[in-house]
């Protein structure tokens, strides 16, 4: 038999019971009441579901904050980068053109480059303003790209396989692992991420947008790592960039 006290212990494991109680207005009186097993199980299920709902609400609101932030940055030209990421510039031309996916494409500098190389590109981002800039640039350059507005924190909705998937400067490691399953045989995944190391670094201040050493390598576990580098170097603006970069290949 599961006591209400035991139930409370389970729920408070990660100290979130108060917040999910508040979320759904579920209130448990925790004392020395003993509930029949079936009832305590039911309560535990409600608690678990409330918690999931709560966390996904929190994630959704964080995504909304990110969307507003990025819409603002693109609208005010605060993130104006036009060249493709160096790693893609180096590796893209070596790969056979096919279907490509640019994850968190922003204003599309990498997607546009891939389209120029002859890839058929799907490009996803949460920012309407970023995607609109990409659309306009593609039209000006007579390039055809499939722009998709989607919150990637809610998971991937597309169900396609790609010859190349790129993820630049967007931290969602479970998503990167999931993306490995969307590679065609012999397909490549290329990614660069900001590293969380001490120092006065360029790039994001929040640790939410940086990864730990070796995290990128672990995220692509199962793929053949063709190139991996972690290090600190000067960036184009004279700042200090700490980054991790990977080029990984799916088995043929
Ligand atoms: C640092 S920018 C990188 C953009 C692009 N990869 C590049 O290299 O120029 C991060 C991008 O992630 C996008 N982003 C942030 N949160 C997102 C989410 N939950 N779903 C989809 N895109 C998101 C932002 O809109 C922004 O365009």
Image: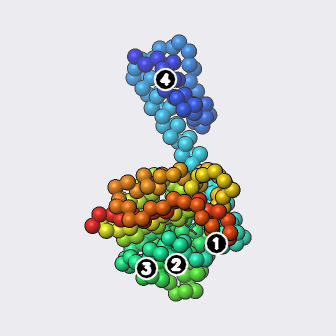
Label 1 to label 4: alpha-carbon separation? 55 Å
Identify the secondary structure beneath mark 4.
helix
Label 3 to label 4: alpha-carbon separation? 57 Å
The residue drawn where x is 50% and y is 70% is: 87
Mark 3 or 1: the one toward you: 1
The first of marks 2 and 3 along the sequence is 3
Classify 10 Å Cα crowding around label 2: few (below 14), some (14-19), many (20 and above).
Answer: many
Residue 68 in percent (x, y) is at 66, 60
Q: Nearer the viewer, residue 235 or 69?
A: 235
Label 2 to label 1: alpha-carbon separation? 20 Å
Q: Which residue is mark 1?
A: 236
The residue drawn where x is 42% and y is 26% is: 41
Q: Quadrant of ligand 1?
A: bottom right
Mark 1 or 4: the one toward you: 1
Mark 4 and mark 1 in contact (Cβ < 8 Å)?
no
Q: Nearer the viewer, residue 155 or 170?
A: 170
Q: Which residue is mark 2?
A: 112
Mark 4 and mark 3 in contact (Cβ < 8 Å)?
no
Question: Residue 27 sits in which quadrant?
Answer: top right
Q: Which residue is mark 4?
A: 7
In the image, is residue 157 above or below residue 123? Answer: above
Q: How is the image coloured?
A: rainbow
């Amino acid at each position: 038999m599961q006591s209400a006290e035991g139930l409370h212990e389970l729920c408070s494991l990660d100290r979130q019971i108060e917040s999910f109680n508040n979320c759904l207005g579920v209130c448990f009186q925790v004392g020395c009441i003993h509930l029949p097993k079936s009832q305590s199980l039911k309560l535990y299920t409600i608690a678990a579901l409330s918690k999931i709902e709560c966390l996904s609400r929190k994630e959704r609101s964080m995504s909304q904050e990110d969307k507003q932030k990025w819409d603002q940055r693109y609208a005010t030209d605060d993130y104006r980068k036009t060249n493709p990421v160096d790693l893609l510039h180096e590796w893209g031309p070596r790969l056979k053109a096919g279907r490509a996916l640019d994850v968190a494409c922003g204003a599309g500098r990498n997607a546009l480059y891939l389209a120029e190389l002859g890839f058929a590109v799907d490009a996803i981002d949460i920012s309407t303003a970023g995607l609109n800039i990409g659309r306009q640039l593609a039209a000006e350059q007579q390039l055809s790209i499939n722009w998709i507005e989607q919150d990637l924190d809610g998971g991937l909705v597309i169900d396609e396989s790609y010859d190349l998937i790129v993820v630049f400067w967007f931290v969602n490691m479970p998503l990167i692992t999931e993306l490995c399953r969307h590679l065609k045989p012999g397909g490549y995944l290329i990614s660069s991420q900001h590293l969380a190391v001490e120092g006065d670094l360029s790039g994001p201040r929040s640790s939410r947008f940086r990864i730990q050493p070796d995290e990128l390598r672990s995220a692509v576990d199962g793929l053949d790592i063709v190139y991996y580098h972690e290090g600190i170097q000067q960036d184009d603006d004279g700042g200090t960039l700490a980054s991790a970069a990977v080029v990984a290949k799916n088995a043929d």
